[in-house]
Structures are given as C-alpha cells and as structure tokens.
Image (tube, rainbow, N blue to C red):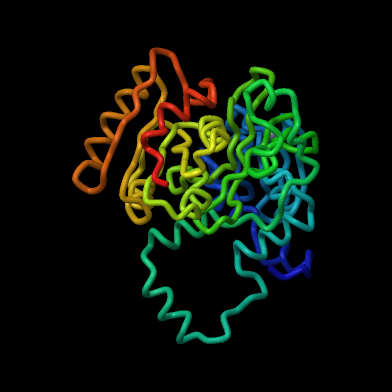
Amino acid sequence: MRDWVDFGAVKQAVSLEAVLHYYQVSGLRKGPHQLESRCPIHRGQRDDSFRASLGKNVFHCFACQASGDVLDFVAAMEQCSIRQAALCLQQWFSIGAPDPCPARRALRSARRGERVREKEACNRPLPFALTGVDPSHRYLVERGIDRATAVEFGVGFYAGPGLLSGRIVIPIRNAHGQTVAYAGRALDGRGPKYKLPAGFRKAWELFNLDRAAATGGKSVIVVEGYFDCLRVHRAGLPWVVALMGSCLSAEQENALLERFDRVILLLDGDAAGRAASRAMAARLSGRCLVEAVHLLDGAQPDQLSLTVIQQLLGRSNPL
Ligand SMILES: [Zn+2]
C-alpha cells in the first residue's frame, strides 16, 4: 500500500457509477442524467431515495441526507476517513499503478479464472483498520469473551462514526490473515443483527481460517457463528473456524479440504443446525474424516462452559 494519495486524481478516475457497481448496489436504475437506487449507506427500503448525478459525479440521499462525491461515498460505506477512502479506491481501481510489464500482466490474467478476479474484486484486503475499539465492553463479558481473546481477534465495541457506530465490530480475515471486512453486531436489538459491507461475499471466507491453519494440526472444528468460534478458541481449541451461517459453500469446502484431514462439526443444537450438520457430513465423507458433535436442544457452542466444550471436543484434540 502506498502512503500517498492524490484525491483529485482518484475523483477524476473513478465514477460513482463504477463504485455503485463495485458495491453491487441492488435496484440501480439509470436515467439520462442520473442513477437512482435504494440508499446503500443507510440501507433504506425506498428504491428512489438515493440519487447520483452522472455529469457531476456526486450523490445525495433524501432520507439520510448523506451526500458528496466518490470519496464521501466510500468513506460512508466503509466508515473510514476521506484519505482511507481514497486509498481504497486507488487500490480497487488500480489508479496510478500501471503494471510495468504488459506481457506479464497478460500472462497473469490469462492464468486466472473469472472467479478469481471476481473474488479479488469483492473481498479485497481493507487498506485501513478501525481504531478505538473497546475489547472490554460489557456485552463481550456477558457473552463470555474475555479481554485477551477480544484483543487477539480485534473484537470490541466501536463508538466511532459511521454504519458500525455503537456495534461490536468483528474483523474478518482471509486465509492470509488480511482483514477483508468488519462484521458489526447490534447491541440494542435493532436490525440487522449483523452488518456486513455491501458486496462482501461471506461464502468465500471462513472466519478464523488463518489462525486455525497456523496451528499446524490436521483437524479443524467447524462452528456456525463468530461468538461460537471465539468461545471454542478461548476454551483452548484454536483450530476452529466459523461458517458465518449454517451452510458450507463450495469455496469453504475446498478451503477446508486443502488444509485439513479431519473435520469436527459443532453446529447449533436446533433443527437447522442438525440438518446442516448432516448435509455437510454427507458432502465431506469420503474426502476427509468427519465427526459431528451433537448438542442438546437449544444449545449453542457460545453458551457452553469452557469445561463442557473441552469435554465435548477433548477426544478430538489433534495434539
Ligand atoms: Zn441514505
């Protein structure tokens, strides 16, 4: 990442239209002079509250009153500074960074599949990190996440400005340990329960994969949610990943099979969790060793005591 950025050059090089497509804003309608859509910033329901002028390359939302140019838009979407927004755009749209060797560029792009390019466009490493995150927040204490675990994962309460304001933020890292998104957990029951950046594909990542793989073991525990993962990690079993949901995508399946020989499924003790566990075991069996740990009705890994987690998974300890 370069530490310099030319705001004017970025604004001139990137159209709001391109940025809206980058974020895969849904319901985008294009008129002769402007674009209309739902507002991706406040995620409103009205499909015409957000307007972008094609000629002036500026936007305005009549509902949340957000307005400005491409830099303001990205700053609002990523909850970051204008400078960080400019760095994001510079990186996403390869501004001012021409590849010095055209032959190498052609060879490289020929080698990559469409899928890989799409992946790189959607889940790119963030060129910034949220600061001022409180790892000792009461909510985390109530959910059994101690300060050391929160600090290790970069999890905490975020009081800064933007979409994640007033939420518990959870950095999601890719297989290389680079942060590609923040999930924001609501504390006050207001929806959505988890906010993720528009355009982010959670099916292409496994939460905590980089740390689980770094343990060097051949076994991995698979749970549904972020807090299940934090809790199992805290119980002394760091070879754990979370699906960020209850289905295993093809990308997640490949990521597991590339790194591990044995998969221990620890999904929620409800109908959805059991069905998902059965489906995953069926898909993985024959390709690796699969074990499923069944929890009692209504139980979730993040609500279990550390001792119970250790007992349930103790026999599965790969070390
Ligand atoms: Zn808005």
Residue in the picture at 75% in, 38% down:
162
The quadrant of the rendered image in which ligand 1 is seen is top right
Return the x and y of residue 180 as percentages of the image width and height. 58, 51
Rendered position, 261 above or below 195: below
Residue in the picture at 22% in, 36% down:
282
Rendered position, 110 above or below 228: below
296 on left or right of 239:
left
132 on left or right of 230:
right
Rendered position, 161 above or below 90: above
Residue in the picture at 78% in, 64% down:
7
114 on left or right of 97:
left
Rendered position, 59 above or below 82: above
Return the x and y of residue 219 as percentages of the image width and height. 37, 46
Return the x and y of residue 117 as percentages of the image width and height. 45, 62
296 on left or right of 1:
left
Give the residue furthest to the left.
Answer: 286
Number of marks drawn:
0
Residue in the picture at 53% in, 20% down:
303
Return the x and y of residue 204 as percentages of the image width and height. 44, 48
The quadrant of the image that shows the N terminus is: bottom right
Give the residue furthest to the top.
Answer: 297
The quarter of the displayed image where residue 140 is located = top right
- Of residues 42 and 274, the one nearer the viewer is 274
